[in-house]
Amino acid sequence: MRLLLLLTTVFFVFTTTAQQGNWVAQMHRPDGNNIAFTFDWKTENGHPVWYIKNAAEKIKVQNITVAGDSFIVQMPVFESQFRIVVSNNTINGVWIKRGAVKTQVLPFTAIQGRKRFVAGGSPTQNISGRWAVTFGEGAEAELSVAEFVQKGNLLTGTFLNASGDYRYLEGIVAKDSLLLSGFDGGHAFLFKAHIQDGNTITNGIFYSGDRGKENWIAVKNNAAKLATESVAMFTKAGQESLDFTFKNLKGEPVSIHDDRFKNKVVIIQIMGSWCPNCMDETAFLSEYYNNNKQRGIEVIALAYEYTTDWQRSVNSLTKFQQRFNVQYPILNTEVTVGDSLKTEKTLPQVTSIKSFPSAIILDKKGKIRKLDTEFYGPATGVHFDDYKKEFEQTVNDLLKENQALLYNFKPNHHGQQ
């Protein structure tokens, strides 16, 4: 046993040391349209670490273990992992991602290098700017917005739609062709297209995961706007406050009526551990809460998971909690994201939840003051900045509103208002 442990340790140290550096990875779809990304393999404090790179984002992956002659690389968020074998200067294995009803398994390879795509010529156009995008065709068409930044062959950017954004994407423009990709453990995306001219992108195809595929086109439009009516949420007639009790990750009941939340501005985060945009919102809300809770602010996360399996849900939500240092309660509603009656079962005071993440903001009296279904993350740049400013202004206004009530309090001669 001691010899086996020693051999495993030697293999572990040798392999992780020998394979340090930059890698170009490929997720191999059955149709041959492989999804590329890059990562750095490092050793920190004697342990292997990956840094998965997409444009300005680096995702640190620390849960890397040895299983025989293989490595298991567990993503820090999502039910997503790699099982790989390292040989010489190549990596072979699979990417495994659990879903609501099926598990995706894609062959995975990587070679040492820095560039996810190799440019096949100088670009004929610079497509930096804002674009009006149409995904799909006919009655199924979805209007979106793309924002690109091109520097030489290098292209970065993202797509925004009514329910969120496609997070960090990176790629190239080679001659009249566009390639963009992104991988964060939840999303595995590839975009291809033909650049017809400086104002028109045609023949676009969007590949997602193991089999997702959708056509897209785009027209340059610096004034392009998103229509968000399809995901809007409203308070139902005659309703003005919420009424719920769900269990936290320890199995303890937490109610919106608990003393902790009385006389405070409360943000209800509607999320799921499967949702990449929820990852960005959780990072924002966690930092905001930790910096502002002393001002009379509380946050409650309501989670809608893939299944009603309590332990599976708690395991996934705990990864969120640990990754983003979440100090506010995360509650498992035990209602699935795919349940058509999820709103009626959990928040019957509002209309249907159509977008993840969403948020409901309550004033100090517990009244619903804002329903927010338009979160855009840090990959969207100015849109994320605008979101934060509007969010903070809403909370500040509610805090001032209640302070004003206290300042205007004038007791009569009996000590009563």
Image (cartoon, rainbow, N blue to C red):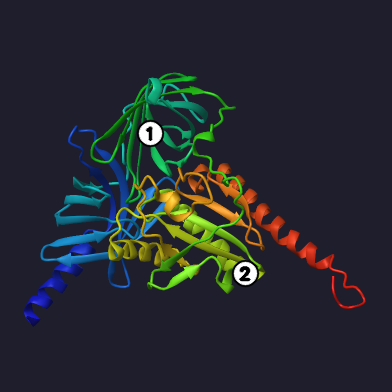
Q: Is residue 144 above or below residue 312?
A: above
Residue 131: image location, x then y, percent: 50, 27
Image quarter of the C terminus: bottom right
Q: Which residue is the site of mark 1?
A: 172
Position of residue 134 in the picture relative to residue 113 (left or right): right
Separation (CA) of disc 2 from disc 1 = 52 Å
- Label 2: state its secondary structure: loop
The picture quadrant where one finds residue 400 is bottom right
- Label 1: state its secondary structure: strand
Q: Nearer the viewer, residue 10 or 285?
A: 285
Q: Which residue is the site of mark 2?
A: 262
Residue 351: image location, x then y, percent: 51, 44
Amino acid type at circle 1 is Ile
Assess disc 2: are there few (<14), some (14-19) or many (≥20) residues with their C-alpha within 10 Å of its C-alpha: some
Q: Nearer the viewer, residue 312 or 5?
A: 312
At a point 35% along the width and 48% down the height, the residue shown is 339
Which residue occupies the extreme right position in the image?
A: 413
At a point 37% along the width and 25% down the height, the residue shown is 136
Q: Give the mark nearest the N terminus, 2 or 1.
A: 1
Q: Is residue 122 above or below residue 250?
A: above
Amino acid type at circle 2 is Lys
Position of residue 152 in the picture relative to residue 29 (left or right): right
Q: Is residue 408 above or below residue 165?
A: below
At a point 42% along the width and 69% down the height, the residue shown is 248
Assess disc 1: are there few (<14), some (14-19) or many (≥20) residues with their C-alpha within 10 Å of its C-alpha: many
Position of residue 222 in the picture relative to residue 56 (left or right): right
* Residue 91 visible in the displayed image: no
Image quarter of the N terminus: bottom left
Residue 324: image location, x then y, percent: 45, 63
Q: Nearer the viewer, residue 210 or 363?
A: 363
Which residue occupies the extreme top position in the image?
A: 196
